[in-house]
Amino acid sequence: MLKFKVTTVGSSSGIILTKEAMAHLRLQRGDGLFLTEAPGGGYRLTPYDPDFERQMELAEQIMHDDREVLRALK
């Protein structure tokens, strides 16, 4: 487990990620992070956009279910 301290950044608050945390999350300076609710009432900090993941799951389902339509579009 990694622990981070909330600090002041201009007129806002932020956290400083260590090199270890950046590497583990596969982040580079300027990348975005998403705070999502986790089961059990906690939160999860992730570099992956949960909305994009849902969109991709729907796209894969459509491609599977309607593959004949997609073949006709070639």
Image: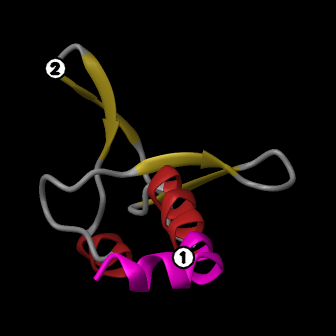
Tell me the number on the disc at residue 11.
none
Residue pointed to by mark 1:
60
The residue that appears at 12% across and 59% down in the rendered structure is: 29
Q: Is 50 rendered above or below residue 21?
A: above
> Alpha-carbon neighbours of circle 2 within 10 Å: few (<14), some, or many (≥20)?
few
In primary-sequence order, the first of circles 1 and 2 is: 2
Check if residue 72 falls in the magenta segment. Answer: yes
The image shows residue 17 at horizontal and vertical percentages of 30, 59
Q: Observer-nearest residue: 34 or 61?
A: 61
How busy is the neighbourhood of tag 1: few (under 14 within 10 Å), some, or many (20 plus)? few
The dominant secondary structure in magenta is helix
Q: Which mark is residue 10?
A: 2
Q: How is the image coloured?
A: secondary structure
Q: Give the Cα separation between the discs numbered 1 and 2.
A: 43 Å
Residue at the far right: name it.
40
Magenta span covers which residues? 61-74
Q: Position of residue 44 (x, y in %)?
A: 60, 55
- Do the CB atoms of the residues marked 1 and 2 lie less than 8 Å apart? no
Q: Is residue 39 above or below residue 66?
A: above
- Mark 1 secondary-structure assignment: helix
| Residue lying farthest to the front in this orientation | 72
* Whole-percent x, y for residue 39 in the image: 82, 56
Q: Is residue 35 above or below residue 69?
A: above
Quarter of the picture containing the C terminus is: bottom left
Residue at the image point whose x is 82% and y is 45% from the top? 41
Q: Residue at x 51, y 67 (%)?
A: 59
